[in-house]
Image (cartoon, rainbow, N blue to C red):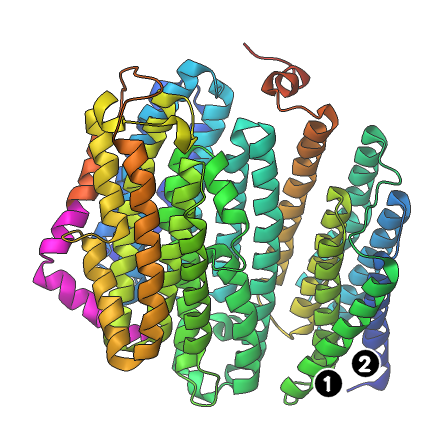
Amino acid sequence: MNPAMFPTGTLLVQAVLLVPAVAAALLALIPGYRITARLNVLASLLTLAAAAALFRERPETGLFLVVDDVNVVFIVLNAFVGFTTSVFSASYIAHELETGRLTPASVRFYHAMYQVLMGAMNLALVANNIGLMWVAVEMATLTTVVMVGIYRTHEALEAAWKYFILGSVGIGLALFGTIIVYLAAKNVVGEGLDAMAWTTLVGTAAALDPNLLNLAFLFLLLGYGTKIGLAPLHAWLPDAHAEGPTPISAVLSGLLLNVALFALLRFKMVMAGNPGALAPGPLMVTMGLSSLLFSAFMLYRRHDIKRMFAYSSIEHMGIITFAFGMGGALANFAGLLHMTMHSLTKSAIFFAVGHIAQVKGTQRIQEIRGLTESHPLLGWGLVLGVFAIAGMPPMGVFMSEFLVVSSTFARQPLLAVPLVAGLLLAFAALLMHLHGIAFGKAHGGTAPVHASYVPLFAHLGLVLTAGIFIPGPVVAWFQHVAALLR
Amino acid sequence: MDRLAFDVAHVLAGSLVLVSFMLLYQERMYALLNVFALQAVLLSLSVAWQAYLQDAPHLYVTAAIALGFKAIAIPVALRTIVQRLHIYRAIETVVGVGPTMLAGIALVTLSIGVMLPVTAEADVLAREDLAFALAVILLGLLMMVSRRNAVSQVVGFMSLENGLILAATGAKGMPLVVEISVAFSVLIAFIVIGIFLFRIRERFDTVDVQVVDSFRGGRP
């Protein structure tokens, strides 16, 4: 093989896509839980290694794949959380097999689907072709749908069905938007693949027909917005999170929502490059704020612990969309930081919640009491996680929320009022629920737990570190990306 | 452009919208599936005509998928489900036929009103196609929200998707159309399998997991 024909960057980007694909095929064929769980972890680790190496070596931008300064952040975050979740998933699935909630056959299916999902998300992130990106997001949606329904209970199937219908409508609308973007580009760059390459679109954004772009962005916002879980398009999200296996809730919240947001950001960059087009900011700000406020109120009357954290995800996706909608270097920086912090924290919370639901045998908040007494390590892990997600200093989420709020105050003080109100409401709701869950007299199962604490505390440690000190190069990188996002 | 070519494309796209209206007022499952199959045949003709006009042989694949998969395979599969589950007349509408049709007319007006001015610079064929495609998409959405029953929701989704394929083929020279139609077919196949499982649960009308397990052939 001639090394010049296959430069390292190209090999790396292929690895990010092919490792999950090959692993999925292997996992579908190999029986036996122990081997497959390890193989799943190993494949995720390899993907992470390849993703991290993309920082150093980039492939040349092609018509189908691109790795640039923006998406490399998303890819690495994706691979990292994918890896830690696979570690958590191994111990979670072992318990599900013991209790008979999952059969060996469905575990095999689950592992294969996990890798397909990781591969699809990576493809959506590295795709330079907007059609290919759409196909990848659709594939990721499909795999999560079947995984949400994997328990085959009435509720799980209903949740999967709802997710399916709403998700399909969402991606249908996104495709219509994509077609209109192509139409706009076709008039400028001519027919063919070039008119669908995102790099060309950004380069020629100023020459595109603004009317077509406006129409397209509306459809894209509604379409990908459904996948992000923005209110009022969020109806699928709480059910899907509550009824699926917890590792999938972690990946859904931590990663898939980000991928959909990333798709929207790509188009926002095209819009921002066209002087005649509608400003995408106000639309995103409105949807972000309404998601934040809506979910802050919804957080109060939750009875299911996973459903509660699903609403918290809607809240945080709202904050992130709001920040990107505000735009500008500082707000974008805050949005990026918040996205990273939310991914890490929320998946850590789901790691804890997964084990909690297993030892207590229920997801009902009323029946989970005094966790710090019965399971100290797990209980305190959850307490730390909720402190972090509620935005208590010195955790990283506090830092990013502070940045969002202060940048809003500096530019649109009036908008900061509902933003802060939403944050405080959500904060109070989470702490109220947490108090009952974590403290007081222990209630429910007290069986010892075989939990994998490493991913949980690794994430929380990272979030804590980020709240206290972020290394200079990381800040510089995020600032650079924030400037690119406009 | 050739006048005839435009007229044929126009007639085909227009009849897709018309059939979307027909879907809105069907009251029986079999009739609904037949009308949907008719729409798929029309879509296939429309795509084939575009393939001929644009001299794009790969679009014939999309046309073939529309004909083989959506006009034949899926209606047959759904028909089996309807038969097995005895839901011949089970179309429950959320609102009456009258208001639904009025809403449909409003949606078609909206899509033509929105698309035609915006696409003033595009060529005539693409303009008309896109306006009709948006109408079909919105009518599909309307059908999904105005029906409660899972099978008719799926038919609504598939007619929405017909609109998307019409739009994709109307956008001249768009790459990946075939791939996208294949991706959609996979999606629909999944939906049909899903509907089957879902309906099984509904039939047993219980949350006992054991029932479905025994139905699946049993496991320890």
Q: Which residue carries the number 1 mark?
A: B124
Q: Residue A375 at x, y = what percent?
A: 24, 23
The kind of secondary structure the magenta stretch mainly shows is helix
Q: Would you place residue B33 above or below residue A170 in this image?
A: above
Q: Is residue A7 visible?
A: no
Sooner in the amino-acid sequence: mark 1 or mark 2: 2
Tell me which chain the residue with mark 1 is part of.
B
Q: Quadrant of residue A45?
A: top left
Q: Would you place residue A41 above or below residue A265 in this image?
A: above
Q: Which residues are magenta?
A: A462-486
Q: Is residue B89 left or right of residue A461?
A: right
Tags 1 and 2 touching, CB below 8 Å: yes
Q: Would you place residue A483 above or below residue A277 in this image?
A: above
Q: Alpha carbon of mark 1 to alpha carbon of mark 2: how far?
A: 8 Å
- Is A443 in front, or is A22? A443
Circle 2 crowding by C-alpha within 10 Å: few under 14, some 14–19, many from 20: some
Three-letter amino acid code of the residue under disc 2: Phe
Q: Residue A427 at x, y = what percent?
A: 30, 52
- Residue found at the far front of this picture: A440
Q: Which residue carries the number 2 mark?
A: B6
Three-letter amino acid code of the residue under disc 1: Val
